[in-house]
Image (cartoon, grey):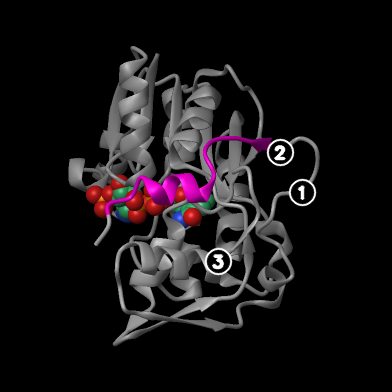
Amino acid sequence: MRIAIAGATGLIGSQLTALARKEGHEVVEIARETGFDLLAADPSGTASLEAALAGADAVVDVTSTGGLLSDQETLDFFTGVARNLGHAATAAGSARTVTLSIVGIDKSPDYGYYVAKLAQERAAREAHAGAVVLRATQFHDFARQMVEWNREGDVTRVIDVPTQPVDTSEIARVLLDQATGELPHDAELAGPRPERLVDLAERYASHVGSDVRVVPVDGPASLMAGAMLPEGDDVLLRGIDWATWLAAQPRG
Ligand SMILES: NC(=O)c1ccc[n+]([C@@H]2O[C@H](COP(=O)([O-])OP(=O)(O)OC[C@H]3O[C@@H](n4cnc5c(N)ncnc54)[C@H](OP(=O)(O)O)[C@@H]3O)[C@@H](O)[C@H]2O)c1
């Protein structure tokens, strides 16, 4: 199959690209690094996107903002990319689009990033008739990102919320199954165990020998109440737990 991957150079996109190629699929890599700005106002950019998607059976969106933006900028990014990709996939005659989203985003009107991801899902469905969505929980790497991104001097502030993180290889697996039509519908995916993000951050810092002090802080009320946790019998619970992931990370 020919599969276009938007965000192919990112954390999930690179794993998905490698997995798809390993299983014999042809991959079209879409990212600014490969010459496609999915938010470009220049119409010639859109034309070249449609040309790149020609013959693609599926288009997967694993793009991300690449940094902390305002709520409005985040909303504009995710909805703009979803619309441009969805319309180009429709014009190219692709059977499916697949969007990577997050478990619990419909329970968090008090968290701008989740409001933007929910709007992204809607925009993807409006722009392409064959749109499906994968909602995943936090990546195992999320605790590392929280420690590194929120660090100020010798302190890092981490929101005190429950989470059930999942290994990124499992996300790539389910996305590919949705792209090929093996799993022809929306799905939710989580790892095997509920954890506390602050606890994971402390264990990660200790594992890499960092002297940073993890300070728990309040997050949006919905997240503190457990919005990020999976719910219901249909959730796919897959992959290694966080402790197993941590044991495989290099020590500092
Ligand atoms: N972090 C979590 O725990 C978690 C959990 C569930 C779901 N998610 C979702 O997972 C998705 C992927 O996250 P990630 O960490 O894999 O992202 P990432 O590593 O930051 O990669 C982002 C990708 O998007 C591309 N990109 C950014 N702006 C672009 C633009 N204007 N045009 C074209 N491509 C653009 C980047 O390439 P260039 O820079 O070259 O353009 C890169 O390939 C996100 O949507 C996120 O919401 C995250």
The spot of residue 138 in percent (x, y) is 53, 54
Q: Residue 168's image quarter?
A: top left
Which image quarter holds the C terminus? Answer: bottom left
* Magenta residues (range): 235-250
Q: Is residue 39 visible?
A: no
- Mark positioned earlier in the residue sequence (3 or 1): 3
Residue drawn where x is 40% and y is 13% of the image: 1
Q: Which residue is mark 2?
A: 235
Do residues under tags 1 and 2 come within 8 Å of each other at their CB atoms?
yes
Residue at position x 61%, y 31% in the image: 129
Helix, strand or loop at disc 2? loop
Q: Position of residue 117 (x, y in %)?
A: 56, 57
At x 72%, y 64%, the residue is 226
Q: Nearer the viewer, residue 97 or 156?
A: 156
Amino acid type of the residue tagged 3 in the rendering: Leu
Q: Amino acid at mark 2?
A: Val
Question: Helix, strand or loop at disc 3?
Answer: helix
